[in-house]
Image (cartoon, rainbow, N blue to C red):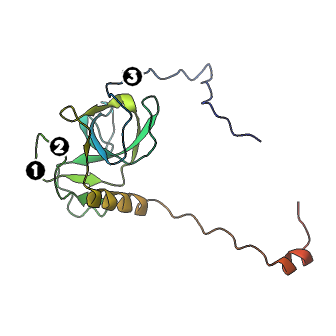
Amino acid sequence: MPIPTTTPSPSDDEPEAPAGRVVLNSASKIRACYWCDFWDDALRPEFYKKRPVVVVSRDNRLDGPVMVVPLTRKAQGGDKWAYKLSENPNPRKPGIDSWAVCNHVYTVSCARLEQMQGAALRMKQADFDEVVRLMLKAMPNPPPPPLPLPAAAAEVLPVVS
């Protein structure tokens, strides 16, 4: 069965979400830090309001979704999924500690993103590598693929359909 290449249209009982106005000049880049205008009706422990994020998805488009990890200046001591960055990517607060909360991966519209001081600032590669390592560690590991049967065993075993 072929895989659909377009997003299915919503049903009559599920209205389409409104489109936001994209303010970026180009698609977001992996490792870039932006302001993200999170929703105001978030529930704890969700992130809310405008805050810095780092983009963790690649091959992004201006009209597509973007995966981000939120950043905070609130100390995250004791949170095994938080990583203290070597420097704050927020140019407004360069001397203040900043943390990536790696178990809060969000998929957002590119329209929620805004450049920091008119430029897409990139997180240091070493910091980004740690953010991704913790993000992946917070997710379950898939089981290993099954081992292929030796040719002799495949001939002996009956085919089950």
Sequence-first tag of 3 and 1? 3
Residue 129's label in the rendered image is: none
Residue 96's label in the rendered image is: 1
Q: Which of 122 and 159 is in front in this view?
A: 122
Q: Quadrant of the N terminus?
A: top right
Residue position marked by numbered label 2 in the rendering? 90
Q: In which quarter of the image is the C terminus?
A: bottom right
Label 2 environment density (alpha carbons within 10 Å; few <14, some 14–19, many ≥20): many
Sequence-first tag of 1 and 2? 2
Label 1 environment density (alpha carbons within 10 Å; few <14, some 14–19, many ≥20): few
Q: In this view, does 25 lie to the left or right of 91?
A: right
Label 3 environment density (alpha carbons within 10 Å; few <14, some 14–19, many ≥20): few
* Secondary-structure class at tag 3: loop
Q: Nearer the viewer, residue 35 or 117?
A: 117
Gap in angstroms between the C-alphas marked 3 and 1: 31 Å
The percent coordinates of residue 64 (x first, y second) are 47, 32
Which amino acid, mark 2? Asn
Gap in angstroms between the C-alphas marked 1 and 2: 9 Å
Decide if residue 45 is in sight here.
Answer: no
Sequence-first tag of 2 and 3? 3
Which amino acid, mark 3? Gly
Gap in angstroms between the C-alphas marked 2 and 3: 24 Å
Which amino acid, mark 1? Ile
The percent coordinates of residue 44 (x first, y second) are 31, 43
Quadrant of residue 154 within the rendered picture:
bottom right
Residue position marked by numbered label 3 in the rendering? 20
Residue displayed at 31% across by 25% down: 23
CB within 8 Å, label 1 to label 2: yes
Quadrant of residue 47 within the rendered picture:
top left
The percent coordinates of residue 143 (x first, y second) are 59, 67
Residue displayed at 56% across by 23% down: 14
The percent coordinates of residue 112 (x first, y second) are 34, 30
